[in-house]
Image (tube, grey):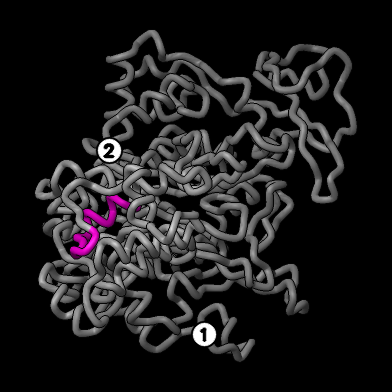
Amino acid sequence: MNIRKSIVFALVIAFMMSIVLTGSGVLTQQATATTAGTTATAQTGGYVKAGDFVTQLLQGAKISVDNGDYWGKAVKMGIIPAEVKKDRTLTRAQAAYIVWKFINAVPELKDKNIPVKVEVLSPVDYTLWSRGELGANFRGAYVPWYRATGWTSDKPIYTSAYRVIRTYNIVVIDKYYKDGTVKTVHVWDRLRDYDPAKDWAKLLQKFMKEQPSKVKFDFPQDRMKALVWKNTPSSYTGWNELPEKKQLYTLYRLKPGDRYYTKEQDGQYYFWTMYKTSSGDVKYGAVILDFLQFGKYKSKNPEDWNLTAELNPIFNESLNRWLMSLPRQYPLDYTRFKYICVDFNSVPKLYQEALLRLADLGIVTPDVNIDKNVFKTKFVDIASYNLKNAKPKVTTPDIRFNAGRVLTQKEASEMIARVFDESRRKVVDEMTFDYSKEKNPETVDKYGNTLYDSFGNPDMTTELLMFQHSGTSITLRVDELWQLFYAQYLMEKYPDAPMLFTNAYYTNPNYLKSPEKRWYKLHVGFGYLDDLPYLGTTAQYQPGSVPIPLINGVALSKQAEDLLVKKKDISGYYSQNNTKR
């Protein structure tokens, strides 16, 4: 293993093995007991009446009415449930019903809130994205597409079945809207019956047993359009035109007379791809898949399955789709709140869909009622946690719709404001991180270039792109709910700690004398350290942030608390820039 990488890997593991949390905070801001109506009354001056709520809602959408009769207009629109009276108070469920019906009744609101299409992408679909602007369509990387021998000791070929399959707890959801807007959320939602990092061989065995005719090399042509292929050791790039009689994104077998032919590579698959430079110039390259092996699925040794193309989801689309069909801990759409909210079954049927839909939109935020001491008393220290042992025993978080609670004026105003102002919305299992105001807001770009660090060797480029994403913001849904609240707990307890995942910076070694280009704030996302999934920043060759294990009930240790409490600035960003956070 490369000495530089060994040192850094040891540092990262040390951080992973060293984090414990204390403190209080962010969770109580969301928490509201079922008896909170009385308290809220004293604070806000009373409850809202249905007529006033409807008037504010319709006025917010600039709905014209006759003689100021907003209630009559709402009744004609069909958005008022029969049991709701104009001069009576509203429950949270009744208000949600009115808002959801209103959104559906007003075309502008419907177009902005209800997508015309939703696509759920696997880690392979996302990494090897084939749409968008060809040659400039890199979105991010969850799975490795290549790495040669010699750089890592854990697997002889980096793009192994194990390294791809382990990421299938992650999906990316794209929501397409009528005006062309696309909203993307990265979701951590475990497979219900398997841990893909540990059970990858079991999954392959099950696939081969259930679908023996699908165990084959099945490499979709569209997948060749992915920009990542320019970053492989066997990618010969830089050509201004295609060779005669060759077509883009078409599989060929190397034979004598072909450009780049060698006797050792005789018969290997290859294809021609197109990409763009950062200046927009179109270039072509040949990608030789000389690392592929075939037929080893017939072996009884799972390590052979690990290396055969027929059992790698990148090169077998049937396997990719089969893995995505496996049941998960929660549904991937709005119905997940049936299982997240412990009081859902007590919600009257008339109001269930409205509450589910608005919770997914962040217009209604379920109440989180947990004792922060659980992080000290119930969580298991990562330093003593063994991945082979059973998960820590933590109860289901107490998250409630509190559908029957009477709505206060303050709560009503906030709900209405969220209908029209998306920046105020709060989805209980999601967090959005925005880096647009940073001097260097992107860590990688759509051309597949690593901006925060770079090396000429394509092996290193592949490594640097792993778990990175283009763009200046990212929305994460964490349905490992205890770890989500744990992360929020950290954010409140240690807001100024340089090693906190919201604060970590990376220094680009190519620009040590250029303050404008030197520092890159690391983006938060999902990643893996071997079998261990985490939430945090990804930095390959410098210490990043303290990562949060994505295993419910796994805490951090005392050593890392010292890093946070003492505000250790390992990268040196804050000490060198004298910046207050």
Q: Which residue is mark 1?
A: 581
Q: Is residue 110 shown left or right of residue 360?
A: right
Residue drawn at the location 33% of the way across and 34% of the way down: 200
In x, y percent, where is residue 23?
Answer: 25, 82
| The one of 467 and 310 positioned closer to us in this rendering | 467
| The one of 50 and 223 positioned closer to us in this rendering | 50
Q: Which residue is mark 2?
A: 328
Q: Specify whether residue 348 is painted magenta.
A: no
Count of numbered marks: 2
Looking at the rendered structure, the kind of residue marked 1 is Arg
In x, y percent, where is residue 445?
Answer: 68, 53
Residue drawn at the location 70% of the way across and 22% of the way down: 249
Range of the magenta residues?
86-99
Looking at the rendered structure, the kind of residue marked 2 is Arg
Label 1 packing within 10 angstroms: few (<14), some (14-19), many (20+): few
Q: Quadrant of residue 32?
A: bottom left
In x, y percent, where is residue 284?
Answer: 81, 32
Query: Which residue is situated farthest in the bottom direction here?
Result: 578
